[in-house]
Image (tube, coloured by chain):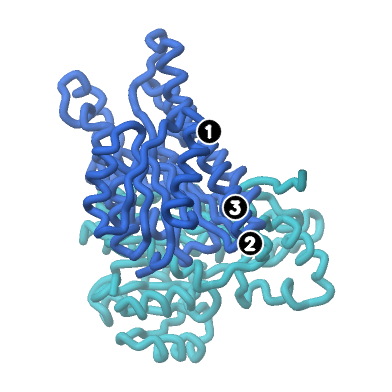
Amino acid sequence: MRFEGKVALVTGGSSGIGAETCVRFAEEGARVAVVASSSPDKAQATVDRCQGRGRAFVCDLADVGAIDRLVVDVIEAFGQIDILVNSAGVFYPTRVGETDEDMFDRMIDANLKGCFFMCDRVGQHMVERGGGGKIVNMGSGAGVAGRSNYLVYSAVKAGVINMTRSFAVALAPHGINVNCLAPGNTATPMNENVRTESEYAEIYATIQDKTPSPRAFADPREMAGAIMFLCSDDAAAAYGAMLLMDEGVSAGY
Amino acid sequence: MELRNKVALISGGSSGIGEAIARKFASEGATCAVIASSNIRKVNKVAKEIKRKSKGYVCDVTKPKDCEATVAKVLKNHGKIDILVNAAGVFYPTPAGDTKPADMNRMVDINLKGQWNMINAVSPHMVSRKRGNIINMASVAGMVALPAYGMYCATKAGIIMLTKCMAVELSRSGIHVNSISPGNTASPMNEDIRTDPELKPVLDFMEMLTPSGRTYSTVEEMANAALFLASPKTGNPIYGANFTLDEGFAAGLFIAN
């Protein structure tokens, strides 16, 4: 029970890597604030897998006022926040000549702005409490090298990776470890279309072709396992690190 | 017991991070072939203490023939090699204009060619089994330049790239190749900096550049990261990664307001 007595707040907790992360935290003894972007039912579905240690919250992460309220609500419910995992995010193609302003803004709001203000607000709480803390952001292999058909997503994830480093040095003097995970293709609802719809057949074939390891998609539970490691005392020396778990895609060709 | 029935070959295993990795891996069930560059008594002591039928070996990693012979011996004794950890290395300044060719060559021979020699010797066995896990010890000095340590930095930058190349080359055979970049980690390799009053300015410099306020990490923490990469429970999707554990050293600048 590595996380007995700890409180973990996980955004994007209703599905994919975030949901598996909530379940793992609960299995290892933490109480978990499961945050969904809009659907309390979806958050509750994850809470139902959390052995009575979870509680559902809803927060529109594009709204800073909503983030402020979320942090207050979670602290009221659990008394503290020891661990923050920013797993919320959206994923859709943004190609040259086919990307409108709304597509751009939504991507920035959900993947970068929300992550920034969560780090900022929860980071402040951790500083005020003393005693350190753990924050894990979600980078991506797409933030390490460009993606011709995911222009905005790759820019935003590069932003998250470097923002992680800045928060890491800003919060390190307070014993708060800020790191990011950079998953590659991981089988989650976010990319179910890529894996199943014929419209994306070409992208899927390219992914398989460009993946050096024998499999194209990792398992979200493996990403949750890495998040457990980064949030444990075993990784106490890691500040501002990017843990790349992408089946070798970013290493080269 | 995350490494039950695994055989791990660990260079630089008689002290520092390599020794800590051998101890950690054995505590998780692995049999360790622990390699020292010259001191067989020292490495035998480690092997005896960690048990699990572990054995000590002496191997000069700068000599390809020596590496091949050691791999053959380990295969004969233990039947297979699941994990290779390249932890052998040296650390000393090489200031421009004041470094003997022999000192520069020794740095490259051990830190860069030595890791290559071991990979070159072990990889045919791993490719034939279609599995394996290789962990190379790089360094934060492979990403951040340190004055007077040019050749150390260059060899470690070389390891980070060698790791990526080996990852893409060997991953199709199911072999994981990754590196760990420790920051300042308390080991015999840097005992002088931590204790010698003459080197206090170097220690002060390191302290100033460490955001976490803890200038030196522990070798056990590096061993934790090695276990994370080597364990089939956690390391599956990781190929060609460079995992930095450096107290924030490489992340950027801490500027007080």
Residue drawn 30% across the image and 49% down it: B171
Please check whether the numbered discs 2 and 1 fall on a single chain: no
State the count of labels.
3
Query: What percent of the width, then of the height, locates residue A116?
Result: 54, 37
Q: Which residue is mark 1?
A: A159
Q: Mark 2–mark 1 contact, CB under 8 Å?
A: no
Q: Which residue is mark 2?
A: B105
Q: Which residue is mark 3?
A: B142
Of the two numbered discs 3 and 1 in the rendering, the one whose residue sits closer to the viewer: 1
Please check whether the numbered discs 3 and 1 fall on a single chain: no
Label 2 crowd bin: few (<14), some (14–19), many (20+), radius 10 Å: few
* Residue type (three-letter) at the residue carrying disc 2: Asn
Q: Work out how far the residue at label 2 is from the one at label 1, CA to CA, in angstroms.
A: 40 Å
The C terminus of chain B lies in quadrant: top right
Query: What percent of the width, then of the height, locates residue A2?
Result: 39, 68
Q: Which chain is blue?
A: A
Chain B display color: cyan
